[in-house]
Amino acid sequence: MKRVVTALLLGASLCGTAIGQVEPPKGQPSRGGSAGVGIGIQVDLRSLVSGVAALLGRATSDTVSNVVAGQVVAVWAEDEVALAPEEVARAMQARVLADHPLSSLGLRLVLFAVDEEDADKLLAQARQSFPQISFARNSYVDTLQTEHTAASPGAAGRQYAHELVRATAVQRLPQPVRIGVIDGAPDANAPLDAASFDLQRFTDTGQSPHASAIACELACRPETGFPGLARGAELVWAAILSPHQNGHERSDLVTLARALDGLVKRRAEVILTSLGTPPNPVLTRVLDRVLPKVRAFVAAAGNGGPNGAVPLPAAHPGVIAVAAVDAAAQPWPQGSRGQAILVAAPGVDLWLPVGGGRYFTGTSYAAPFAAAWIAQRLARSQSADAAALCATAQDLPPAGRDDATGCGLLRWSP
């Protein structure tokens, strides 16, 4: 008990500004709307939980905020393992919640319900009993964005992205390329110039501003103020996000895996996702099956800051991980760093004609630049792999490859 109390006190100190004055820093408006100065305690519970978890020797990726309580996921190759889900469930004292054949990948994905208090122990036992099966806690999948801010109603905001990457004369694709997108459901009335738009819903959800922004980056009509970078593409969309009790849109590992299988089944040539989840063996195994079946896989590199790990899918070998830079081609301070990052693209205060015009920030909005670059090159029968992307990129300081921007700033070269 003494250790827990000490951890709580130290955890609070690790929160930086978690305890202190309610008054905002100089130059920033008060969120409370009062002109007076209030003294009190402001606690960032998420930072506190992470700090305490670290002090207690528990990885933050296993905290309640990142896993779905009482759920374990398993995946195995159907041509290698002749087991019924119920057999696995009995051995790990679990109950089958869902059984999903991933037919285009030759895999079977099963979701089990377990006692949350014994989840980690049962997971370890399952891995030992069934070494040919990949197991993981069912984890949440999150958008890789920060809050977006409104621009002046009806006014096209400050534009820098096209010029920064030298895409000032973006042409419509000379022939369609099938881009598979995993996100939320975009605005059905968005002014898109796509050869086709095929939406498959994996969850019941309404319109997603995050998804609408991604769709606009790919295919918005020029008259909107942001010419889409892959107009004329065949957009094959998998909507997996839904509102969560934390106030944000989220999905989970099981739904993401099903969406990946669905995009392969629908013959996507390029897969794009601006979502992320902590590394786990289940998604790793699914991605191993997906990558050989598509021309390219692009993912946002994450918003974990300089010490934050690149999430999956971006961290997986063979996936093109895209970091974000601002109008001055400076790395976004909140972007994750790591060897997995291949290239950087605009993703800070990016104006898009969504919701009357808004500024969006996050690696979420950098990734579509790379997906569109690849689609433009494929439509012209040009090399569009990671080596070609690096060969055309502009090196950013420090010289050579680095963990913040990879090979450098994406340069438009179709």
Image (cartoon, rainbow, N blue to C red):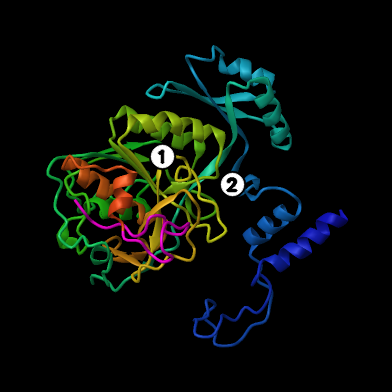
Specify the farthest residue to the right.
2
355 or 403: nearer the eye?
403
Residue identified by numbered label 2: 66
Residue identified by numbered label 1: 318
Residue placed at 63% from the left, 20% from the top? 130
- Crowding at dot 2, Cα within 10 Å, few <14 / some 14-19 / many 20+, comes out as some
Specify the farthest residue to the front.
399
Residue placed at 54% from the left, 85% from the top? 26
Q: Main secondary structure of the magenta part?
A: loop
Specify the farthest residue to the top.
82
Whether the magenta-drawn stretch holds residue 411 is answered as: yes
User: Where residue 50 appears, x then y in whole percent?
Assistant: 66, 56
User: Where residue 72 appears, x then y in whole percent?
Assistant: 60, 32
User: Where residue 299 appears, x then y in whole percent?
Assistant: 40, 47
Q: Nearer the viewer, mark 1 or mark 2?
A: 1
Magenta residue span? 394-414
Whether the magenta-drawn stretch holds residue 42 is answered as: no
User: Where residue 103 appears, x then y in whole percent?
Assistant: 40, 21
- Crowding at dot 1, Cα within 10 Å, few <14 / some 14-19 / many 20+, comes out as some
Residues at circles 1 and 2 in contact by the CB criterion of under 8 Å: no
Q: CA distance from mark 1 to mark 2?
A: 25 Å
**Who comes first in sequence, dot 1 or dot 2?**
2
Helix, strand or loop under label 1: loop
The amino acid at mark 1 is Gly
Helix, strand or loop under label 2: loop
Q: How many marks?
A: 2
The amino acid at mark 2 is Asn
